[in-house]
C-alpha cells in the first residue's frame, strides 16, 4: 500500500498540468493527430514527424508507470518536461536549469535512471524525498558504479555509470523549486556540490581526449576482409537465392486447391526429378513435428526426413495427407533412391575463389529456408559494417540512409566516377535533422546497392536500409558465421573477440587515414582514396557530416606530425641523423632547438619542461610534414617542391605524393623507418632486370638507374645512423 501524501506540504498545481506535449516540446504531428498529454503516465511519440530512424520502438515513448509512488511519478514527469521545454515560463527562471533542449534519446536515458533511483530508495525504506540525505545519494552512486560477479566480489567499477547515476540525483536537486509534489529538502546539496563528471572520476581522463579507442588491427583486418568478400563475391549468389525464395513463397501463397491431386500428378513430378537429377526436399529441422512425422521417424522410415508437404505444394495442394502415403510410397522410395534429398536452396552453387586465395570452392552448401534467412541477415550486417568502416558514418547517420539515397554516378573523366549518397545530419541539429550529402568510394556505393536489393523489389523509396541499425547482437551473429564452418570453408580469417561499434569504426578510419595515408587499409583498400573522397565531401558540402569527420582526421594528423617530428628529434639527439636532400635544413632546426633549450635551462633550470618546450618549438615545422611511402616531405616552400615543378602547379598548397622523387627534392628526408621500402624497391628492380631480354635496352637502363638511386639512398641512411652505434661503443 502506497504512503499517503504528506499533509504538511502545501499542494501546488503543476505548471504543466493539462498541457499537450508535442506543441510544448516543438514536435510536429500529422494533421488531425493530438497528444500525448502531460497528465498521462505514458507519453508515446511514435507519430511525431522527423524522429531519428535509429530510435528503437521503446525509445519513442517515455513510460513513467514503473514509478509506483504517485508523487515521485509526478516529480519525474515535471523534471523530464522541463528538460524538453527549457523555455517554458516555469523553467527559464530556475537558476540551475538546462538552457538547451534535451533530445528524446537523452530524456529516455534520464528517465531510466530515475526509475532505478526511486526503486533503490523504496528498497531503503524511503517514502518521502525529504528523507533523502547525502548518505543516500553517495550510497546509490556506489551501488550503481560497482558490478558484482557471481561470487559477490566487485569485478568492475564504471566511472561512466557513476556519472549517469550522479546526474539523475543532481538533476532533481537543480529543479526542486519547480516540482509541485515531493522534492528534496532545500538544504540538501548532493555530493557537496560536485558535478557528475568530477564526482564520478571521469575528469581524471585527459581533457579533450577521445575515449573511443580504434579497433585493434587483429580485429580490423579480418573483419574488413570478411565484409568486402561477402559484398563483392557472395552477394550476387545470396541475392539470387533470396529472389528464388520470394518467388517460391509467392507461388505457395497462391495455392488454393485443397483436394487430393491425382496419383499421376505426383508421378509426373517425381519422374521429372529423376530425369533432371533434382533431389527431393529434406524437411527443415524447424518444420512442424506432427504425429505422422514422429511415427515415420520412430520406425526409421526412409521417407521420414523428406518434406512431403513441399512435394504436395508442387502438385497444387497445401498439405500432404497421411492417407495418401501408402499409395505413393513405391514411387517416392524409388525417386529417393535415385536422386536423394537435400535442402531446397543453394542446390547448384557456383564456385568462387576462396578469400585466402587457395583455390575455388562452392559458395555454399544446400540451405534450408531459415539458413538462407540468416545468410541474408549476415549480408545486411556486412553492408552496414562496410559503410560505417569506410565512410566513418555515425550510427544516427547510418540510420538515415534510405532506398534511393544513391545518386547517379558522375563521370569526371572517362572511366573515373564520383559517387554520392544523400542522407541526414542528425547530431547537433533540430528534430528531423538537415539534408546532407556524402562523397564515397565505389566499395561503399556497391554496399548500399546490395542493401537496397536485399529489401526486395517491393521496397519503396524512403525505406530505411539499416533499421534497426546493426548492434552488438547482429555483429556477433556475423562474427559467429565467419568463424564457423561456413566461413572457414570459404577461407575467411577468424575474427578475434572485441567490441565493434560505429563509433569504434569511425575512430579507426580516422586514425588509419591520419597515420598511414600512403599505405593500404586492412582489406587492400587504398587509404588515399578514402582520404580524397572525404575531402571532396567536405568541399561539396562544407559544414556537413563529412566535414566534421575530416576535422577529426586533421586533429589526428597534427598529433601524428608532432609525434613523428619529436621521434626524429630524439633520434638526432642519439646520433641518428636524417638523410636526403632536406636533411641539412632539418638538422639546422634541431641544432637551434638544442641551443634554445640550453639557454632556457640556464635561466630557469627547475622550471623548464624540456618535453613541452620541444613540442612548442617543433609545432610550426610539424604542420608542414606530409608522409610519403619512402620519405618525409617538409612542405615549407611550394616553390622548392619538385613534384609541383614537374606538374606545373607551383601554387598548390599540398605536395603531389604520386609525383614525388624524394632522392632529388630539396624538402624530402629519409630516415631508418624508410630503409625497408628502398631495399624492397632495389630488389624488385633487380628481379625485373633479370627477366629482361637483350633487346629491352631502354627498359634495362631505366631500371638500372632505379637500382643505383635506391642503393645511394640506402647508403646515405646507413651512414646517417652510424653515429648512433659509435656513441653506444663509446
Image: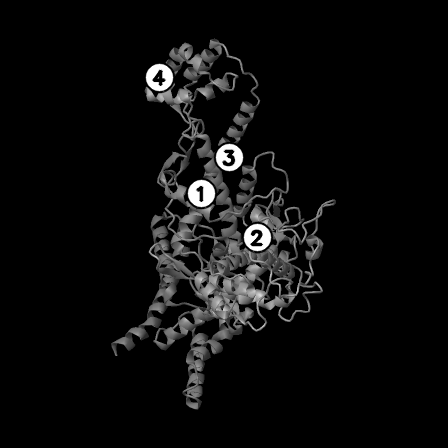
Q: Nearer the viewer, mark 2 or mark 1?
A: 2
Quote the CA–CA distance across marks 4 and 2: 55 Å
Q: Position of residue 131 (x, y in %)?
A: 53, 66
Q: Residue furthest bottom?
A: 603
Residue occupying the far left of the picture: 729
User: Residue drawn 66% across and 49% down?
Assistant: 48
Q: Callout 1: helix, strand or loop?
A: helix
**Total marks in image:** 4
Q: How is the image coloured?
A: one colour
* Residue 337 tag number: 4
Q: Callout 2 environment at 10 Å: few (<14), some (14 to 19), or many (20+)?
A: some
Dot 4 surroundings within 10 Å: few (below 14), some, or many (20 or more)? Answer: few
Q: Position of residue 250 (x, y in %)?
A: 56, 26
Of helix, strand and loop, which one carries label 3?
A: helix
The numbered dot on residue 239 is 3
**Can you tell which of label 3 and label 1 is closer to the viewer?**
3
Query: Which one is earlier in the sequence, the residue at label 3 or at label 1?
Result: 1
Indicate which label's residue lies in the foreground, 4 or 2.
2
Say which label, 2 or 1, has the lower sequence index: 1
Reading the image, the residue beneath label 1 is 229
Which of pointers 4 and 3 indicates the residue nearer the eye? Answer: 4
Rounded to the nearest angstrom, the CA distance separating label 4 from label 3 is 32 Å
Determine contact: label 3, label 2, CB under 8 Å: no
Q: Mark 4 vs mark 3: which is more N-terminal?
A: 3
Question: What is the spatial separation of the Cα atoms under label 4 and label 1, in whole angstroms?
Answer: 38 Å
Residue designated by label 2: 396
Which residue appears at 37% of the width and 61% of the height?
154
Mark 1 closeness class: few <14, some 14–19, many ≥20 residues within 10 Å: some
Label 2 secondary element: helix
Q: CA distance from mark 2 to mark 1?
A: 26 Å
Q: CA distance from mark 3 to mark 2?
A: 27 Å
Residue 666 in view: no
Amino acid at each position: 500500500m502506497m504512503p499517503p501524501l504528506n499533509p504538511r506540504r502545501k499542494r501546488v498545481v503543476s505548471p504543466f498540468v493539462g498541457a499537450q506535449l508535442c506543441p510544448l516540446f516543438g514536435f510536429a504531428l500529422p494533421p488531425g493527430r493530438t497528444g500525448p498529454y502531460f497528465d498521462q503516465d505514458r507519453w508515446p511519440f511514435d507519430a511525431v514527424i522527423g524522429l531519428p530512424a535509429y530510435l528503437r520502438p521503446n525509445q519513442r515513448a517515455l513510460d513513467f508507470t514503473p514509478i509506483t509512488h504517485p508523487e515521485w511519478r509526478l516529480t519525474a514527469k515535471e523534471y523530464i518536461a522541463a528538460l524538453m521545454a527549457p523555455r517554458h515560463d516555469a523553467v527559464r527562471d530556475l537558476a540551475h536549469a538546462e538552457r538547451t533542449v534535451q533530445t528524446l534519446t537523452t530524456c529516455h536515458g534520464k528517465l531510466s535512471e530515475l526509475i532505478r533511483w526511486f526503486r533503490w530508495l523504496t528498497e531503503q525504506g524511503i517514502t518521502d524525498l525529504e528523507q533523502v540525505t547525502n548518505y543516500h545519494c553517495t550510497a546509490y552512486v556506489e551501488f550503481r558504479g560497482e558490478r558484482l560477479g557471481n561470487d559477490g566480489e566487485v569485478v568492475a567499477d564504471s566511472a561512466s555509470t557513476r556519472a549517469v547515476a550522479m546526474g539523475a540525483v543532481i538533476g532533481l536537486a537543480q529543479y526542486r523549486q519547480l516540482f509541485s509534489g515531493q522534492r528534496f529538502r532545500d538544504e540538501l546539496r548532493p555530493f557537496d556540490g560536485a558535478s557528475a563528471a568530477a564526482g564520478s572520476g571521469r575528469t581524471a581522463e585527459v581533457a579533450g581526449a577521445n575515449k573511443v579507442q580504434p579497433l585493434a588491427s587483429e580485429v580490423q583486418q579480418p573483419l574488413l576482409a570478411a565484409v568486402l568478400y561477402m559484398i563483392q563475391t557472395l552477394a550476387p549468389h545470396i541475392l539470387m537465392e533470396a529472389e528464388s525464395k520470394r518467388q517460391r513463397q509467392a507461388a505457395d501463397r497462391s495455392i488454393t486447391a485443397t483436394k487430393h491431386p491425382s496419383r499421376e500428378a505426383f508421378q509426373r513430378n517425381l519422374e521429372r526429378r529423376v530425369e533432371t537429377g533434382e533431389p527431393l526436399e529434406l524437411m527443415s529441422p524447424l518444420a512442424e513435428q506432427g504425429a505422422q512425422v514422429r511415427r515415420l521417424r520412430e520406425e526409421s522410415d526412409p521417407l521420414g526426413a523428406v518434406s512431403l508437404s513441399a512435394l504436395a505444394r508442387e502438385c497444387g495442394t497445401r498439405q500432404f495427407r497421411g492417407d495418401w502415403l501408402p499409395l505413393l510410397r513405391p514411387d517416392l522410395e524409388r525417386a529417393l533412391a535415385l536422386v536423394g534429398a537435400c535442402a531446397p536452396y543453394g542446390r547448384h552453387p557456383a564456385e568462387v575463389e576462396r578469400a585466402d586465395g587457395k583455390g575455388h570452392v562452392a559458395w555454399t552448401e544446400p540451405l534450408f529456408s531459415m539458413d538462407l534467412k540468416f545468410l541474408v541477415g549476415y549480408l545486411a550486417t556486412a553492408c552496414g559494417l562496410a559503410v560505417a568502416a569506410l565512410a566513418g558514418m555515425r550510427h544516427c547517420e547510418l540510420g538515415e540512409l534510405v532506398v534511393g539515397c544513391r545518386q547517379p554516378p558522375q563521370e569526371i573523366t572517362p572511366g573515373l566516377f564520383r559517387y554520392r549518397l544523400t542522407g541526414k545530419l542528425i547530431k547537433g541539429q533540430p528534430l528531423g535533422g538537415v539534408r546532407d550529402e556524402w562523397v564515397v568510394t565505389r566499395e561503399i556505393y556497391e554496399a548500399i546497392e546490395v542493401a537496397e536489393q536485399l529489401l526486395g523489389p517491393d521496397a519503396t523509396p524512403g525505406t530505411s536500409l539499416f533499421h534497426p541499425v546493426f548492434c552488438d547482437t547482429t555483429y556477433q551473429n556475423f562474427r559467429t558465421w565467419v568463424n564457423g564452418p561456413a566461413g572457414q570453408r570459404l577461407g575467411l580469417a577468424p575474427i578475434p573477440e572485441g567490441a565493434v561499434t560505429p563509433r569504434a569504426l569511425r575512430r579507426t578510419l580516422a586514425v588509419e587515414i591520419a597515420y598511414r595515408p600512403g599505405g593500404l587499409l586492412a582489406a587492400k583498400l587504398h587509404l588515399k582514396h578514402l582520404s580524397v573522397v572525404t575531402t571532396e565531401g567536405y568541399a561539396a558540402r562544407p559544414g556537413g557530416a563529412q566535414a566534421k569527420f575530416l576535422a577529426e582526421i586533421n586533429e589526428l594528423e597534427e598529433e601524428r606530425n608532432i609525434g613523428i617530428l619529436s621521434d626524429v628529434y630524439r633520434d638526432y639527439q642519439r646520433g641518428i641523423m636524417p638523410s636526403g636532400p632536406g636533411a641539412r635544413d632539418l638538422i639546422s632546426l634541431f641544432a637551434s632547438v638544442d641551443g634554445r633549450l640550453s639557454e632556457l635551462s640556464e635561466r630557469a633550470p627547475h622550471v623548464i619542461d624540456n618535453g613541452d618546450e620541444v613540442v612548442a618549438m617543433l609545432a610550426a615545422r610539424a604542420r608542414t610534414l606530409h608522409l610519403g611511402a619512402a620519405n618525409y616531405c617538409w612542405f615549407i616552400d611550394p616553390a622548392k617542391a619538385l613534384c609541383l615543378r614537374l606538374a606545373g602547379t607551383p601554387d598548390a598548397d599540398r605536395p603531389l605524393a604520386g609525383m614525388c622523387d624524394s632522392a632529388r627534392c630539396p624538402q624530402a628526408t629519409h630516415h631508418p623507418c624508410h630503409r625497408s621500402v628502398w631495399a624492397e624497391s632495389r630488389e624488385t628492380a633487380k628481379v625485373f632486370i633479370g627477366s629482361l631480354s637483350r633487346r629491352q635496352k631502354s627498359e634495362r637502363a631505366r631500371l638500372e638507374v632505379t637500382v643505383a638511386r635506391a642503393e645511394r639512398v640506402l647508403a646515405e641512411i646507413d651512414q646517417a645512423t652510424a653515429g648512433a652505434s659509435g656513441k653506444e661503443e663509446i
